[in-house]
Amino acid sequence: MPSVNLDPDVARERLEAAGVEVEPGNTDHERWRAERGDANAVAYDDTVVVQGSRPTDLLAVLREDRGGRAHVYFDGASRGNPGPAAVGWVLVTSDGIVAEGGERIGETTNNRAEYEALERALEAAREYGFDEIDVRGDAQLIVRQVRGEYDTNNPELRERRVRVRELLETFDRWSIEHVPRAVNDRADSLANEALDDG
């Protein structure tokens, strides 16, 4: 569980400014608690601990330096095609990994899982307030469809492509490239770990 190196009073102000309800702590050691989406935060005397299945739901609000540039990695996995599926994504800056996530998404095809992973990664990058992103994935079909080099004949994939393009347009600058699986290893691992844990 991530710990945020942030004064609990400053953290509280940021959460309240974002419309997150802050409640009293449950024990003498807890200063306050807050919940947003699938994440919750607990403040102690000198630290804030964020927990839950999607800690980015709160970490993005608590992040001090909004803006900047990030590398965004995504990967979707499906066993059976269609079959059990999961997504993995990673946000990286010059400081290292800022956020990452992996979770099961039910049963679907590999291409749909790849698009879902890309959407989740872009939503996380937007929540973190990045201005510029360089997106990387090992799904050549998805990358080429998003760039407009390939047609998207499947109606559901076409809708997902439109959604991805809408998300990309919310950034000041973006790029998307196909990379070998070895370069996308962390996102791939997160997707497969989520499948294994299911």
Image (cartoon, rainbow, N blue to C red):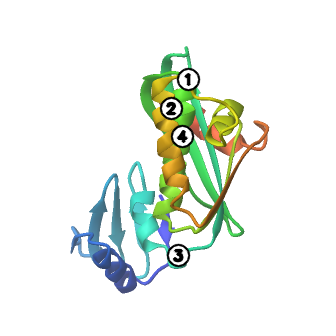
Q: Which residue is mark 2?
A: 158
**Which is more toward the observer, 76 or 133?**
133
Q: Which residue is mark 1?
A: 153
Kind of residue sitting beneath label 4? Ala
Q: Tell me if 58 is positioned left or right of 137 in this view.
A: left
Q: Position of residue 118 (x, y in %)?
A: 56, 43
User: Within 10 angstroms of label 2, few (less than 14), some, or many (20 or more) residues?
Assistant: some
Q: Quadrant of residue 93?
A: bottom right
Q: Is residue 157 above or below residue 18?
A: above
What kind of element bears circle 2? Answer: helix
Single out the mark in the foreground, 2 or 3: 2
Q: Position of residue 183 (x, y in %)?
A: 77, 44
Q: Residue at x 50, y 16 (%)?
A: 82
- State which tag comes first along the sequence, 1 or 3: 3
**Residues at circles 1 and 2 in contact by the CB criterion of under 8 Å:** yes
Q: Which residue is mark 3?
A: 66
Q: Which residue is mark 4?
A: 117
